Every structure is written in structure tokens, then in C-alpha cells.
Image (cartoon, rainbow, N blue to C red):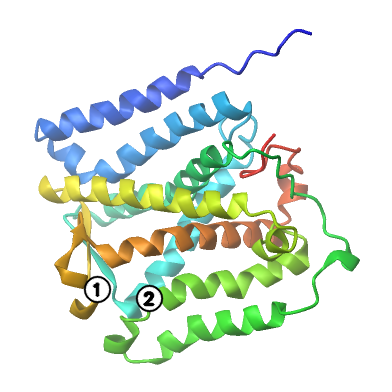
Amino acid sequence: MKTLDKPKFPLYGIFGIVTMVTGEILLAMDVYFAAVWLTPIMWTGYIVAADALLYRRKGNSWLTTRRREFPLVLLLSVGVWLLFEALNFHIQNWTYYSVPDNPIIRDFAYFWSFATIMPGVFITSEILSTFTPTRFLFHHQIRSDEVFPGAGWLWFLCGLLMVVIPLLLPTPIASYLFGSIWIGFILLIDPLNDRLGAPSFRRMLRERTYWPILSLLAGGLVCGFLWEAWNFQAFLSGGGHWIYLVPEPLRIFGFHYGKMPLLGMLGFPPFALELFTMYHFLRKILDGDRLLGRPKDGELFLVEG
């Protein structure tokens, strides 16, 4: 029997690699534009290159077989992060420096940067998921008799309290509880996804399908290291960067990775779960299957084809 050849690495992946290398070269040459725009430049190159690698490993990817859905993930990425920006007005955990002065250009820089968040995490996690030894096909409608009737309400209630309580407390106290918000949205929304028939962690746990969860956790951590590395490069070059306002008692022994207090790195894995939960909830209520077409087996991220 003839063995099917693995898909070739798409040429657009070379463009992504060249974009990243060019960004680093321009930064080393002290080109001001590269310093100010380093985060969106590097993440755009990374997403394009990583998507090509994903296609090489799976035979499908966002930029090849899911192009209709890719604009949605970009827009929802911006929308979800704007929600966290709104919450940050109260919890005061980060602030931006050396961004463009012109408000139109600055907003475009924010939009471009925020649009890379979900794609970066999802593509990274999906690449990691291809190393699973078994197939995880979990994207199909959940029948009403399959919905777990147990502790979903408890997840929802705990999540609601974890999100709302920090917002009711004074900022000096709320700034200690940012972890509550990152985890709270997972518990708040995932039971809704379970009920709606969207991919959910509750269902994965019931079916003992752990690899997608582990892939997301690992993907979030990998992206966290990349975010902070490129942010630190931009900081050293006087370009656009962010600074964390984490209270001093949480800066354990003063250890940092880049500008992130070391303890804060633990937030990136659950952040990936949070993005997954929010994306599928929003996709479901927007009737994504009807507007964009129902994904085929293996075409939904974290599903091994």
C-alpha cells in the first residue's frame, strides 16, 4: 500500500520566519519603528510561521483550510482582550509605555497587537496537541441526554463570585486578586458551553479526554514566555512595552522573567483555557456553524485529524 506523503511546509511559513528575523535585525540596528511595533511584528511572523508548521503536521490549519474562520478569531481576540483592558481599569495590573502618540496610530497598534492573542495561543496549543498518541474528536453536538446535570451550577456560581468580588473591592485589594478573574471566567462560561453543545472542559473531563486541556495549558505557557521575551526586548530598546503593577508582596524574592514577576508566569496556562472557553462561547452564540460552516473532523483546533 502506498504511504501518503506528509503535507509540505507552505511557502507562507517562510514569509513568517523572514518577518521575525527581519524584526530582530531591525531591532538590533536600533530602528525606532521596529522597537515601537515589535510585539505585533513578531507575533504576526510567529503566527504565520507556526500555522505553516501546523499544516505540515496535521494537513489543515487556520490559514489553509479554515480561512473563513480566521477573521472571526482575530476580531474575537480583540474583543475579549478589550474586556480585560476594561477590568484592568479597576484591578490595575499593567500599563503601557512608549506607544505611538497619535491616537489613531496608537489604537491601530493596540488592535493589531490584541488581534494576535487568540491565534498565537490556539495555533501553539494545536501544534502541541499533534503530539498526542490518540485521536481526540470532540466537536459534535451533545445530545440532551449526554449533558452532565451535576455540578455545572456550582462551577457557574464559583466563577461568578471569582469575577465579581474583585470588582466590588477597592483597587488596592482587588490588585491582589487578578488570578481570581483569570480562573473565574473559565468556571463561569464553561458550564454554559457544556449546555450549548460547544466544546467544554467539563465534557473533556467526563470523557477523560485530557490531552486538549494539557495542550492548552502548555501552549499558554509557551506563549507567555514569548510575550514576555519580546516585551522585554522592546523595553530595552525604548519601544512599545507594558509594565506590570503587581503588588510588591507578590513579587517573590524579586524574581522576574523579563518584566513579569515570576509568580505571574503561572497565569498564562489558565489564560489559554480562558481564551478557549470564551472563543467557543462567542462562536456558539454568534451561530458560527451556520455563518462559517461546521468544521470537519480534524479542522477544529486541538482535534487531531
Q: Horizontal and vertical percent for residue 27?
A: 16, 35
Tag 1 and tag 2, C-beta contact below 8 Å: yes
Please identify the residue farthest to the right as the structure is shown. Answer: 145
Vertical side of 300 occupied by 63: above or below: above
Ranked by sequence position, the earlier of labels 1 and 2 is 2
When the figure is inspected, residue 5 is found, relative to residue 276, above or below; the finding is above
Q: Position of residue 23 (x, y in %)?
A: 24, 32
| Amino acid, disc 2 | Phe
Q: Is residue 60 above or below residue 4?
A: below
Element marked by disc 2: helix
Pointer 1 local density, CA inside 10 Å: few below 14, some 14–19, many at least 20: some
The residue depicted at 59 percent of the width and 61 percent of the height is 277
Q: Is residue 73 left or right of residue 121?
A: right
* Residue 238 seen in the current view: no
Name the residue that disc number 1 marks: 246
Query: Which disc is residue 178 wearing?
Result: 2
- Residue that protrudes farthest toward the front in the picture: 133
Image-quadrant location for residue 168: bottom left
Using the rendered view, name the quadrant where residue 249 is placed: bottom left
Quarter of the picture containing the N terminus is: top right
Q: Nearer the viewer, residue 246 or 222?
A: 222
Query: In the image, 110: left or right of 160?
Result: left
Q: Is residue 184 above or below residue 267?
A: below
Q: Residue at x 29, y 72 (%)?
A: 93
Amino acid on which disc 1 is placed: Val
